[in-house]
Image (cartoon, rainbow, N blue to C red):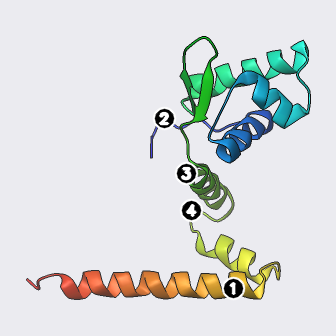
Amino acid sequence: MNDDFQDVTTAELAVLQALWRSGTSTIRQLARSIYDDESAAAYGTVQKLLDRLEAKGHVRRERGPTHVFAASTARDELIGRRLRAVADTLCDGSLAPLLTHLVQADRLSSVERDELRALVERLDGERKSRINGRPRS
């Protein structure tokens, strides 16, 4: 992860989400996707948001007769950075209280709980493999 990371505004996030869904898009396609509008105002708003996202390093532009844009920040990276910021702000840097609250909020379906259990078991297994695989000094 880049230490020069700059967070995004709500409007910028809408552009990133559209790019995550589509992979690549032109300004006109993004205006249609985000605002259901191809007017000059919508086009100009998206163009300005893309300029800001590009300056922050979240979007890359392929120049040509029609510029094509793609997200250069992955959704998982942004989620991780935002969750880390919340943990730092509200939980003195610990992720455990944040995760505990999210799990206990009763919003997880049984499938999501099963996926979470499987993830924890997999991570525990990987940790044990690394510990057991290291030569003892």
Q: Say which of 124 and 61 sits in front.
A: 61
Q: Nearer the viewer, residue 109 or 43?
A: 43
Depth check, mark 2 against mark 3: the one in front is 3
- The amino acid pointed to by label 1 is Arg
Of the residues shown, which amino acid type is indicated by label 3?
Answer: Glu
Q: Are marks 3 and 4 in contact (CB under 8 Å)?
A: no
Q: Residues within 10 Å of mark 1 (few under 14, many from 20)?
A: some
Q: Considering only vertical position in the picture, is 97 above or below 49?
A: below
SS at badge 2: loop
Q: Nearer the viewer, residue 48 or 102?
A: 48
The residue singled out by tag 3 in the image is 77
The residue under label 4 is 93
Residue on which disc 1 sits: 113
Does residue 131 appear to the left or right of 84 in the view shown? left
Q: Position of residue 97 (x, y in %)?
A: 66, 74
Tag 1, which secondary structure?
A: helix
Sequence-wise, the earlier of marks 2 and 1 is: 2
Image quarter where the C terminus lies is bottom left
